Amino acid sequence: METFLIFNLMVLWLLMLLVLSVSLRLLRWQHTQQATLARGAGASQAERGALKGKLAPAFTAFLLDGGQRVTEASYLGSQTLFLFLSTSCPHCRTIVPEIERIGARVLSKGGKVACVFAGEAEKTRAYCQELGLTLPVLLAPAETSSFSDDYNRAGSVPAFVAIDPEGIVAHEGVVNRREQAWRALVQEWQVYPMLAQSPALYR
C-alpha cells in the first residue's frame, strides 16, 4: 500500500512538472509573437513616415452640407487647413471655439479650411449643430475612405494638416497650444497677428 502511494505521488509530481514545462513554453511563444507583431507595427509606421514636406495624398470626401464629392484637387492653389475631429473626443469639444476663430482668420486671408470627420453623417451633423461649428465639414467614413488614415497618421484627435498652395504639406500635428507644430502654424500664417511681436502671449 505504501509503495502504491509513493508511486502515485511520483506520477503526480511528474505530471505537474510536465504541465509547468508546457505552460512555460506557451508563455515564451506568446511573448515572441507579441514582440514580432510590435516590431511589424513599428516598421509599418516608420515606412509611412511623416507627411511634412511631401505632396499631400489624394483623397475623396463629401461635404456634410449638400453631399458634394470633393478631392484634393478642390484645394490646390490655396493655403489649406484640414482639422481632424471626432464626435467621441472630449478635447475636440473644448477646442471648437478656437478652431472657429482660426478658421475664420484663414478664410479671411483667402485660404481654405475644412473639419474632417470619419463618422456617420447624422451624428456629425448633430455634433456640429450642438457646438455651433460653422466651418466647412467633410465626411470621410473610415469604411469607404482612407482620408483620415492617410493624413492623420498618428490617429490622435484633434489633429491638423496644413498644405501650401502647391499641395505640399507644410505642417502637421496635434491641435494644442503647447505643441510646437501648432504654434509654428499659427505664427507662420499669422492666425494671431500678435504672435509676430510676442510669442510668449500664446501660452
Image: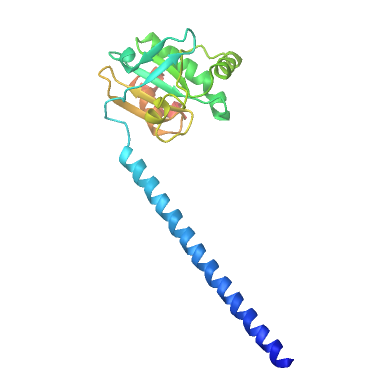
Q: Quadrant of residue 93?
A: top right
Q: Position of residue 149 (x, y in %)?
A: 41, 30
Q: Position of residue 179 (x, y in %)?
A: 43, 33
Q: Residue at x 39, y 11 (%)?
A: 107
Decide which of 95, 29 is in the foreground and name it: 29
Decide which of 111, 180 is in the foreground and name it: 111
Q: Left or right of 121: which side holds 168?
A: left
Above-or-below relation of 106 to 47:
above
Q: Position of residue 118 (x, y in %)?
A: 48, 24
Q: Left or right of 124: which side holds 167?
A: left
Residue 197 appears in the picture as rendered: no
- Quarter holding the N terminus is bottom right
Q: Residue at x 49, y 9 (%)?
A: 65
Q: Residue at x 36, y 41 (%)?
A: 45
Q: Quadrant of residue 4?
A: bottom right
Above-or-below relation of 194 to 31:
above
Q: Position of residue 186 (x, y in %)?
A: 39, 23
Colour scheme: rainbow
Decide which of 23, 160 is in the foreground and name it: 23
Q: Residue at x 58, y 29 (%)?
A: 90
